[in-house]
């Protein structure tokens, strides 16, 4: 999934070569329009909003934790706090 800025033929071909489906909105200036799964693209928005909310926690945004295990624990705690709100 990508933004309109990633609507290029070489990127779409690279995605297709890996066996994946490109969910990228068409650039308005594109002559050949590709179909867009609007439901799948809407899911991208939900994921971006989740990351935005997680970055409101300073320890998550600045990555104070030195180990991956501790960082994952901080992200998990932040996600629990967001879920409980």
Image (spheres, rainbow, N blue to C red):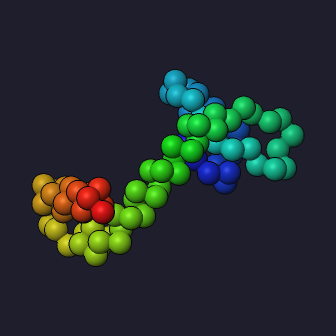
- Left or right, 56 with respect to 77, comes to right
Farthest-out residue, top:
19
- Left or right, 55 with respect to 79, comes to right
- Left or right, 55 with respect to 68, comes to right
Residue at image location 70% in from the left, 38% down from the top: 9
In-front residue for pair 11/48: 48
The image quadrant of residue 8 is top right
Residue at image location 74% in from the left, 33% down from the top: 34
Which quarter shows the N terminus? top right
Which quarter shows the C terminus? bottom left
Q: Tell me: residue 11, above or below residue 66.
A: above
Farthest-out residue, front:
85
Residue 12 in view here = no
Residue at image location 52% in from the left, 28% down from the top: 20
In-front residue for pair 27/85: 85
The image quadrant of residue 70 is bottom left
Q: Tell me: residue 68, above or below residue 61.
A: above
Q: Where is residue 39 in the image (x, y as percent from the top left)?
A: 59, 37
Residue 25 in view here = yes
- Left or right, 30 with respect to 53, comes to right
The image quadrant of residue 62 is bottom left
Q: Position of residue 64 (x, y in %)?
A: 20, 73
Q: Tell me: residue 21, above or below residue 82.
A: above
Number of labels in the image equals 0
Residue at image location 13% in from the left, 55% down from the top: 69
Q: Where is residue 51 in the image (x, y as percent from the top left)?
A: 40, 59
Q: Tell me: residue 60, above or below residue 4.
A: below
């Amino acid at each position: 999934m990508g933004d309109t800025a990633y609507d290029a033929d070489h990127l779409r071909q690279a995605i297709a070569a890996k066996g994946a489906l490109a969910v990228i909105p068409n650039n308005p200036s594109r002559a050949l329009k590709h179909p867009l799964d609007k439901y799948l693209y809407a899911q991208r928005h939900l994921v971006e909003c989740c990351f935005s909310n997680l970055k409101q926690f300073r320890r998550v945004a600045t990555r104070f934790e030195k180990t991956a295990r501790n960082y994952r624990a901080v992200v998990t705690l932040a996600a629990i706090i967001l879920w409980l709100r």
